[in-house]
Amino acid sequence: MISFRNVTKKFGTHIVLDKLSFDIQPNEFVVMKGASGAGKSTIISMLIGAEVPDDGSVEVDGVIVNAMDEDTKQLYRRKVGVVFQDYKILPRKTVFENVAFAMEVCGESDEAIQRRVPMILEKVGLLSFQDKFPENLSGGETQRLAIARALVHKPRLILADEPSGNLDEENVRGIIRLFKKLHEEGATILMTTHDPLVEELAKGRTIYLENGKIV
Ligand SMILES: Nc1ncnc2c1ncn2[C@@H]1O[C@H](COP(=O)(O)OP(=O)(O)O)[C@@H](O)[C@H]1O
Ligand SMILES: [Mg+2]
């Protein structure tokens, strides 16, 4: 499903990733662990084509992401569910509208939006919050909204960058339970974290990243 081949990434003279290679099989649940600055978010960015390697290749489903033209990249991104480290929630839109917006920008019909958004909100346990604004959500609820938005296109690949953020243990447990459910439903999951609790709960394969290499 995912294949990094000798990926090197530099920012200026700083080598963030150093000839990094790893594979993730379809329907694996992989936790990528590493200290702050290890390059976890950079890896997620490369998987959606937002950053390109200086050398090597990033392949997803047999296609080289770093060689895609802009149009192909746009279509590709719709098939990948991404939960960003900083959520990227729209503060002036309600919970419902935040999820709906992710469908609108892809030109989905009103009818599809009205049918699908409640289903997704139900899945993440936010149906009764659909008319609330993000400022009235707790940390755990905000994170679940970010996950809901990543699910609009029924992605087979879900990338989650530090989804446990600053959540307390109970909320971390809830979030991991949700990812495990998505995994059981067939998704391939790559989650980054620096939190030992996430690694313990996920019970998946762990990849350790240190100084740009896998250790
Ligand atoms: N756009 C950028 N420009 C310059 N340096 C960057 C940029 N993005 C990330 N970095 C640097 O690359 C390193 C890895 O960052 P990042 O992938 O965000 O690490 P992590 O997510 O593991 O904390 C850090 O030293 C960070 O400062
Ligand atoms: Mg990061």
Image: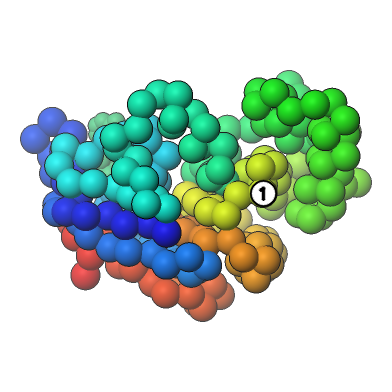
Horizontal side, residue 128 vs residue 61: left or right:
right
Residue at 78 percent across and 35 percent down: it is 95
Which residue is tagged 1? Answer: 154
Q: Is residue 197 above or below residue 94?
A: below
Horizontal side, residue 161 vs residue 23: left or right:
right
* Residue 129 appearing in the image: no
Horizontal side, residue 94 vs residue 182: left or right:
right
Horizontal side, residue 210 vs residue 204: left or right:
left
* Residue 14 appearing in the image: yes
Q: Is residue 32 above or below residue 60?
A: below
Residue at 40 percent across and 24 percent down: it is 70
Residue sitting at the far front: 62
The residue at label 1 has a CB less than 8 Å from ligand 2:
no
Disc 1 on helix, strand or loop? loop
Residue 4: x, y in percent?
27, 55
Considering the image in quadrants, where does the N terminus appear?
A: bottom left
Considering the image in quadrants, where does the C terminus appear?
A: bottom left
- Amino acid under disc 1: Lys
Residue sitting at the far left: 13
Q: Quarter containing ligand 1?
A: top left
Q: Is residue 185 above or below residue 93?
A: below
**How many other residues sit within 10 Å of disc 1, few (<14), some (14-19) or many (≥20)?**
some
Residue at 58 percent across and 61 percent down: it is 187
